[in-house]
Amino acid sequence: SAVISQKPSRDICQRGTSLTIQCQVDSQVTMMFWYRQQPGQSLTLIATANQGSEATYESGFVIDKFPISRPNLTFSTLTVSNMSPEDSSIYLCIVGGRGLDTEAFFGQGTRLTVV
Amino acid sequence: AQRVTQPEKLLSVFKGAPVELKCNYSYSGSPELFWYVQYSRQRLQLLLRHISRESIKGFTADLNKGETSFHLKKPFAQEEDSAMYYCALKASYNTDKLIFGTGTRLQVFP
């Protein structure tokens, strides 16, 4: 299993500013993902955080808006840049191993409100 | 396109009643399906996975490839089952990413 510490748990930010969310895992994990859950919506994958290389972004998400770092196998950050009210959402770090049947582990989420 | 559909946003039952949370998926290959649960003020956690064919907390789910469904069932609901339930699909060996449904909130009344 893996225990994930995600910070901050919530924040209220002014539009035009940026927020960096941290995800710290208590053990080395192969896969780290960043998801977003907008109100009433499903969890949507933003990107896969790759250790030592650029993140792999899903359609509709770009590096300039959501820069991601993953300096090692236990830590990653997601930055929400130049925020607007439409970025108000829950952001979630999810980790797991390779293979179809491996379990995923979840951070507690970051509830972001942009005013 | 890969997709997971949970048609019910809210399902309300009384304690002791049977429960079925519906999940349908869209994927041309052989997916791996999961049910994840989020209890009040807790983070998401695994409830059960298709490949294990196990029963957890009285819940079972059978993969029906003909109907592309993975419904979650429990014969007798308990109040402590009240939670948010997400069906998820893992579709590829290469990416390991999960595709989630929109979730169903289960309310079990005493």
Image (tube, coloured by chain):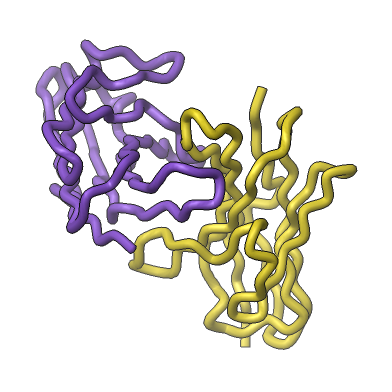
Chain colours: A purple, B yellow
Give the answer, above or below, for where A63 lies relative to A47: above
Q: Name the residue located 31 percent from the left edge and 13 percent from the top edge.
A: A62
Residue B91 percent across, percent down from the top left: 60, 35
The residue positioned 17% from the left and 20% from the top of the image is: A81
Name the spot of residue A38 as percent of width and height, x first.
41, 36
Instruction: Estimate the x, y position of residue B95 in percent, counting from the top left.
Output: 47, 30
User: A30 left or right of B25?
Assistant: left
Residue A79 appears in the rendering: no
User: Image quadrant for the C terminus of chain B?
Assistant: bottom right
How many marks can you see? 0
Residue at x 75%, y 65% (from the top left corner) = B20
Residue depicted at 44% across the width and 40% down the height: A39
State the residue in front, A78 or A69. Answer: A69
Q: Position of residue A67 (x, y in %)?
A: 20, 20
> Closer to the camera, B101 or B50?
B50
Position of B45 with respect to A79 (left or right) is right
Q: Is residue A15 left or right of residue A111?
A: left
